[in-house]
Image (spheres, rainbow, N blue to C red):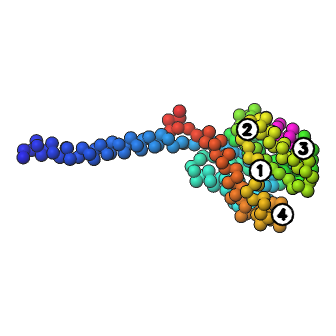
């Protein structure tokens, strides 16, 4: 066999390898193009004791768990927890504009109303306060997620139904991201609550995050960019 023929044979024998490497390169390029690169952004959590982590270590609250989950997914998001234990919608409304100005959030998670219900405050006032905060967030170009609440039936059937319906009506009118009952996964099991019977314990916090995540995740994904920025 001549030198030329040996070289030709060597090239032919390597052809399948070269084709496989080329196909692999194309596959990897395609896969990378489909993986979003998250834009940097800020999530403002604006709620009451349920989000402030009442009675819990800071790292145990569902908001801290959300921060950890986003980091695990390489989402470059800053979480600002401006929740205050005991907050009503009126109190939240009074400080909401300042919180927006301070944080300039891309996403707002609004978790207020529970204390209005526990104090049997007028549902119409609660609705007006929530709507005002939602409108302010949208005026600031923030996406917003509303977390709905329920109150015990011993507040009276009429008031309890009006209270829960208020969240549904707001979500429908505003056509917004919405979790109908934030505590749905844990509400029926008293072992999920602290001794006061009101505030969820540490063991319940992952389930609370899981109640929020399916609705929040698309909002976070909406902040993503392709690697080329297109």
Looking at the picture, does residue 202 appear above or below residue 173? Answer: below
Name the spot of residue 9 as percent of width and height, x first: 15, 45
Name the spot of residue 124 as percent of width and height, x first: 90, 40
Residues under numbered marks 4 and 2 in contact, where contact means CB atoms less than 8 Å apart: no
First along the sequence among labels 1 and 2: 2
Q: Say whether residue 126 is magenta.
A: yes
Q: CA distance from mark 4 to mark 2?
A: 31 Å
Residue ID for mark 3: 123
Give the number of the disc on residue 181: 1
First along the sequence among labels 3 and 2: 3
Looking at the picture, does residue 154 appear above or below residue 121? Answer: below
Give the number of the disc on residue 176: 2
Q: CA distance from mark 1 to mark 3?
A: 17 Å
Residues under numbered marks 1 and 2 in contact, where contact means CB atoms less than 8 Å apart: no
Q: CA distance from mark 3 to mark 2?
A: 20 Å
Q: Residue furthest left?
A: 1
> Along the line of sight, which residue is nearer the eye, 173 or 221?
173
Residue 91 in view in this figure: no
- The secondary structure type at the circle numbered 2 is loop
Q: CA distance from mark 4 to mark 3?
A: 23 Å
Relative side of 13 to 165, left or right: left
- The secondary structure type at the circle numbered 4 is loop
Residue at left offset 42%, top offset 44%: 28
Question: Mark 2: few, some, or many residues within 10 Å (few <14, many ≥20)?
Answer: some
Residue at left offset 46%, top offset 43%: 31
Name the spot of residue 7 as percent of width and height, x first: 14, 44
Q: CA distance from mark 1 to mark 2?
A: 15 Å
Q: CA distance from mark 1 to mark 4?
A: 17 Å
Residue ID for mark 4: 197
| Region of the chain picked out in magenta, as a range | 125-132
């Amino acid at each position: 066999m001549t030198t030329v023929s040996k070289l030709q044979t060597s090239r032919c024998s390597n052809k399948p390898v070269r084709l496989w490497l080329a196909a692999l390169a194309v596959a990897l390029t395609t896969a990378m193009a489909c993986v979003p690169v998250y834009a940097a952004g800020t999530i403002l959590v604006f709620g009451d004791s349920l989000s402030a982590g009442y009675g819990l270590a800071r790292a145990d609250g569902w908001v801290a768990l959300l921060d950890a989950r986003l980091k695990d997914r390489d989402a470059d998001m800053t979480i600002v927890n401006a929740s205050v234990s005991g907050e009503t919608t009126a109190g939240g409304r009074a400080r909401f504009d300042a919180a927006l100005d301070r944080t300039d959030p891309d996403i707002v998670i609004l978790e207020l109303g529970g204390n209005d219900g526990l104090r049997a405050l007028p549902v119409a006032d609660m609705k007006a306060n929530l709507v005002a905060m939602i409108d302010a967030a949208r005026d600031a170009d923030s996406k917003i997620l509303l977390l709905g609440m329920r109150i015990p039936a011993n507040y009276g059937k009429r008031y309890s139904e009006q209270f829960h319906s208020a969240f549904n009506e707001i979500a429908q009118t505003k056509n917004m991201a919405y979790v109908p009952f934030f505590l749905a996964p844990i509400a029926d099991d008293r072992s999920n609550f602290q001794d006061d019977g009101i505030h969820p314990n540490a063991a319940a916090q992952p389930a609370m995050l899981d109640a929020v995540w399916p609705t929040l995740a698309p909002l976070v994904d909406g902040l993503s960019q392709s690697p080329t920025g297109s």
